[in-house]
Amino acid sequence: DADVTQTPRNRITKTGKRIMLECSQTKGHDRMYWYRQDPGLGLRLIYYSFDVKDINKGEISDGYSVSRQAQAKFSLSLESAIPNQTALYFCATSDSTGVAGYTFGSGTRLTVV
Amino acid sequence: GQNIDQPTEMTATEGAIVQINCTYQTSGFNGLFWYQQHAGEAPTFLSYNVLDGLEEKGRFSSFLSRSKGYSYLLLKELQMKDSASYLCAVKPNSGYALNFGKGTSLLVTP
């Protein structure tokens, strides 16, 4: 099994729909992150969490919300999806030192039509 | 905040050496990472530098100069499978997440 699992892998949804992307990890890491990736724009931080009771906004949090249900689970929600939220979404984890870098999930390709 | 610059695209020949540069401006610095990302896949960790100097790991080496806000990734003996995007990421002071550059798309040609 993968260390960081994202579901679904691919999703097409309609404008205005609420959608949740899920992420779970078996690394035992406290820190979890959500990024989106768009061509030419690189990876941009949406939200991050350093433990179950800690939630922080990233540079592009508008239109998104998150829930840290447990140390191993961190979900991202789009309350009312819009077409410019079409992107590749990555969940990642790291230990508290951060020196080993991130372990990324395989990504969720989301298309909003 | 952080400003991280990398070339958008590079092309190199199989068997050659290529250097991918990354410059950054930051209000806090606690290390720099390089990741490799093949199209449609997750980024994978290549290297981490926190002190000035060169870190060598097989065909890949990474260099950091903190005073100049500069790093490079050196790939030797290029192989076709090295065609990928290479992401430079800066770790701010503790308590913050990684900031990524936009990535450099490397094409290795026969």
Image (spheres, rainbow, N blue to C red):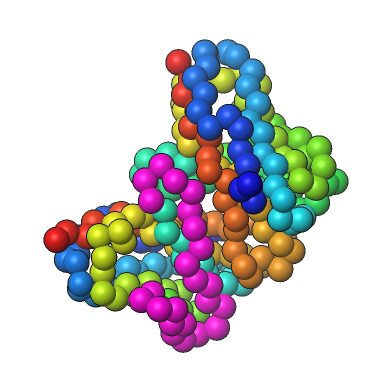
Residue B17 screen position, x and y as percent: 24, 75
Most extreme residue toward the right is A53
Residue B84 screen position, x and y as percent: 33, 55
Q: Quadrant of residue B63?
A: bottom left
- Quadrant location of the N terminus of chain B? bottom right
Residues in magenta, as a range: B38-60
Residue B46 screen position, x and y as percent: 47, 67
Above or below for A93 versus A111: below
Most extreme residue toward the front is A1
Above or below for B36 versus B68: above
Q: Residue at x 63, y 70 (%)?
A: A99
Q: Nearer the viewer, residue A37 or B27?
A: A37
Q: Is residue B45 magenta?
A: yes
Q: Is residue B43 left or right of residue A91?
A: left
Q: Residue at x 42, y 59 (%)?
A: B36
Residue B109 visible: yes
Q: Residue at x 66, y 65 (%)?
A: A98
Residue A57 visible: no
Q: Quadrant of residue B23?
A: bottom left
